[in-house]
Image (spheres, rainbow, N blue to C red):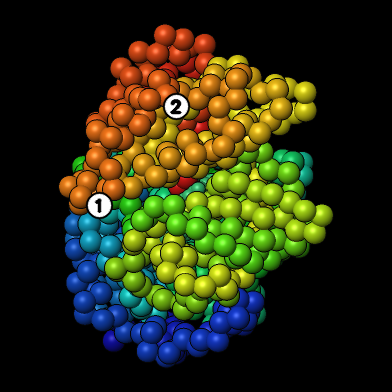
């Protein structure tokens, strides 16, 4: 008796039940490119569905799934229905019944197959599915063959979809990069569709509409579909479809437009290192992605030609990456209201998400082109020559670099590479320090001062100890000046010094700074003080806590600081802990006296407020420069705007990257 009432299915299943989870050449190629010698243990992919996976699927009300269309292009989607719409019938059979958007490309692929279109004619379609529970980040994968399918048109844009899936690949996955959210089933009728098809490059390239670009820029969760067709045919022994989740901070998928083509650029984050999806990209060169917008229920589906880009080439397109998957979109469908889920919780991003990686041209536009290594391709070596203690939490490190560096405006920064100096072994998970999993050991610090001779350049950086960090504790613990680092580059455009020659310093400025954010101002002030004929009035608001006060003293101690036509004055806002007060060698009262002696400073034992800024008579006539910890900087920029200073008159530096 056939399992499904059709004797031919018995033959099919017997053929298909072969264990088919050896790593193929594509997966091994990716590992080789990255210098990873790791084979996948045979037990990772199980032919039988474990009971806990069956129970897991039976409890879901959403499930992502992928297949290929009549042109063998992968498409992914998310199916939804009240809980119980996925029924495990045995340890290898799942049945699914739900309402779908008729224009969903996954559904269209099923219909095309039913109509006998394309190369899969006479064969069963392959599928891959992924169950994710967004409330707890559990995730399980299945893959196999679609035994039976039925699509029946209902009213408007909806259809009823019924699938019987045979699965012989089952695998659990880690919770990394998954955004937590609560989703409830809430049926909505799909509305409008944007569809574009293109085949070749150039003239027939695809441009995404505005809404699609917006969905990509906000997505922190996507589903990535790939295929591996053995001998270029579906349903040979080794053929299968791949589907997995990819997640990151919103914007982690970048879009690159070249002439008429649109490319989706997907940086690789540290995973299990088996490279199942990227191996498929390597072997078959195609991929599809669904970008769900959980806040509106819209879904963007793309498919296209996919390429893996490795190492130096990856770094030259997207600095600080060693592997990118680039997808040239050949077709896309944007469906409004096609995801019948309503989100009833705020989204919580994964602590494993690395900082956003930008394309080289995006960095250049942001004034951060130096991350691309200055274009020369030659990495300089920086040797540590002096360590000076500035305060208990801040030390100044001076590095010597052979030859001359590119000109950096005062306020600019240097980017160092600690690979080789600090050893960070591969780790799959690290709940205590999740950011370490993707740490590329690249760090940036403002150049607080620099000097050069004909043979070498010295640059100094004041580095605050971040006790829970990796690199600053390493530097602060150094007892000897014995360290060589890669210098990726120098750059930055946060400066009151003009980028063009013959442009003069602003006559009046406001500098607002907090904590370690004073370093660019130290650098600018040093340069102003030694600039012949400099003429400017600077009002500084400096907000700091405890020991950071020493950074302020660094500013005052500049020998040239009182030149007749340069005036630096302002307000210092200081909050302190009892521990700090007891460690001070002078009383706060003495400090206040010291500051007020010069009539240039006033001292407040509180945080800076909007009224302080608004209270400065000629505030609106000044160029405004802001640099401080993220929160302070955001607040200050908001206040400045409320006071009526906007646009190019406001300059800001951001220390988080
Ligand atoms: C333009 C600029 C100027 C800066 N100037 C100064 C300065 O003058 N003095 C100072 O003390 N700090 C400065 N910072 C902040 C400094 O780069 C680091 O955040 C800090 O020193 C990190 O120390 P850590 O390794 O101990 O932190 P960790 O906590 O180990 O770093 C945590 C994570 O953050 C990421 N990360 C940390 N720093 C950076 C970075 N700079 N770029 C990209 N990713 C990063 C890492 O990938 C890592 O995963 C500046 C940052 C920028 C972007």
Q: Residue at x 30, y 24 (%)?
A: 609
Nearest the eye: 283 or 398: 398
- Graded by Cα atoms within 10 Å as few (under 14), some (14 to 19) or many (20 or more), the crowding at tag 2 reads many
Are dots 1 and 2 in contact, CB under 8 Å?
no
Give the residue pinned by disc 2: 540
Residue 51's image quarter?
bottom left
User: Element under label 2?
Assistant: strand
User: What residue would you read off at disc 1?
Assistant: 583
Q: Is residue 371 above or below residue 568?
A: below
The image shows residue 174 at horizontal and vertical percentages of 34, 71
Query: Which residue: 51% across, 55% down?
Result: 396
The residue under the point 37% across, 55% down is: 393
- Is 205 on the left-hand or right-hand side of 601? right
Given residues 437 and 279, the one toward you in this image is: 437
Give the alpha-carbon distance from disc 1 to disc 2, as whole Å. 26 Å
The answer to whether 528 is drawn above or below residue 219 in the figure is above
Task: Classify 367 as above or below 230.
Answer: above
Q: Secondary structure at mark 1?
A: helix
Estimate the x, y position of residue 132 in percent, counting from the top left: 30, 62
Q: Is mark 1 within 8 Å of ligand 1?
A: no
| Badge 1 or badge 2: first in the primary sequence | 2
Crowding near the residue tagged with mark 1, few <14, some 14–19, many ≥20 C-alpha atoms within 10 Å? few
Q: Residue furthest right?
A: 454
């Amino acid at each position: 008796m056939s399992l499904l009432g059709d004797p031919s299915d018995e033959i099919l299943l017997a053929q298909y039940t072969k264990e088919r989870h050896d790593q193929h050449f594509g997966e091994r190629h990716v590992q080789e490119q990255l210098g990873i010698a790791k084979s996948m243990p045979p037990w990772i992919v199980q032919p039988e569905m474990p009971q806990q996976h069956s129970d897991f699927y039976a409890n879901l009300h959403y499930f992502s799934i992928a297949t290929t269309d009549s042109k063998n292009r992968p498409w992914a989607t998310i199916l939804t229905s009240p809980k119980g719409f996925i029924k495990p019938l045995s340890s290898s059979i799942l049945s699914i019944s739900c309402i779908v958007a008729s224009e969903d490309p996954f559904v269209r692929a099923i219909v095309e197959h039913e109509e006998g279109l394309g190369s899969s004619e006479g064969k069963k379609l392959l599928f891959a599915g992924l169950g994710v529970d967004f409330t707890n980040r559990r995730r399980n994968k299945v893959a196999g063959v679609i035994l039976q399918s039925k699509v029946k048109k209902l009213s408007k844009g909806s259809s009823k979809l019924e699938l019987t899936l045979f699965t012989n690949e089952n695998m659990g996955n880690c919770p990394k990069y998954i955004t937590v959210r609560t989703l409830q089933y809430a049926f909505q009728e799909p509305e409008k569709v944007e569809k574009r098809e293109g085949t070749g490059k150039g003239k027939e390239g695809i441009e995404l509409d505005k809404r699609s670009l917006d969905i990509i820029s906000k997505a922190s969760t996507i589903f990535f579909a790939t295929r591996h067709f053995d001998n270029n045919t579906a349903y040979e022994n080794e053929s299968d479809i791949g589907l997995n989740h990819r997640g990151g901070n919103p914007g982690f998928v970048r879009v690159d437009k070249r002439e008429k083509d649109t490319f989706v650029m997907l940086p690789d984050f540290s995973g299990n290192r088996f490279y199942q999806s990227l191996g498929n990209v390597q072997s078959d060169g195609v991929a599809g992605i669904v970008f769900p917008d959980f806040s509106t229920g819209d879904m963007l589906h793309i498919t296209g030609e996919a390429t893996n880009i490795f190492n130096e080439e990856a770094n030259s397109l997207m600095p600080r990456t060693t592997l990118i998957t680039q997808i040239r979109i050949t077709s896309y469908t944007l469906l409004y209201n096609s995801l019948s889920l309503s989100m009833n919780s705020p989204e919580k991003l994964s602590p494993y998400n690395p900082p956003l990686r930008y394309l080289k041209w995006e960095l250049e536009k942001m004034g951060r082109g130096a991350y691309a290594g200055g274009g020369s391709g030659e990495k300089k070596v920086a040797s540590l020559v002096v360590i000076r203690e500035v305060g208990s939490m801040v030390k100044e490190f001076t590095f010597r670099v052979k030859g001359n560096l590119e000109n950096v405006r005062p306020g600019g920064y240097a980017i160092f590479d600690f690979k080789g100096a600090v050893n960070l072994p591969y780790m799959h998970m690290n709940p205590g320090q999740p950011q370490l999993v993707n740490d590329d050991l690249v760090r940036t610090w403002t150049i607080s001062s620099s000097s050069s001779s004909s043979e070498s350049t010295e640059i100094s950086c004041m580095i605050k100890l971040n006790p829970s960090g990796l690199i600053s504790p390493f530097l602060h613990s150094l007892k000897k000046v014995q360290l060589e680092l890669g210098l990726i580059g120098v750059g930055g455009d946060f400066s009151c010094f003009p980028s063009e020659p013959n442009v003069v310093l602003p006559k009046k400025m406001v500098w607002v700074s907090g904590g370690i954010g004073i370093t660019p101002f130290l650098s600018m002030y040093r340069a102003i003080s030694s600039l012949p004929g400099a003429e400017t009035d600077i009002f500084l608001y400096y907000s700091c806590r405890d020991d950071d006060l020493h950074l302020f003293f660094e500013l005052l101690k500049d020998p040239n600081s009182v030149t007749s036509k340069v005036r630096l004055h302002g307000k210092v806002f200081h909050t302190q802990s009892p521990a700090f007060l007891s460690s001070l060698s002078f009383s706060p009262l003495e400090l206040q006296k010291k500051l007020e002696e010069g009539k240039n400073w006033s001292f407040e034992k509180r945080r800076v407020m909007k009224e302080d800024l608004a209270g400065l008579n000629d505030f609106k006539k000044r160029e405004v420069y802001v640099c401080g910890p993220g929160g302070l900087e955001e607040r200050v920029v908001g206040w400045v705007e409320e006071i009526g200073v906007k646009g190019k008159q406001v300059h800001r530096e951001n220390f988080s990257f």
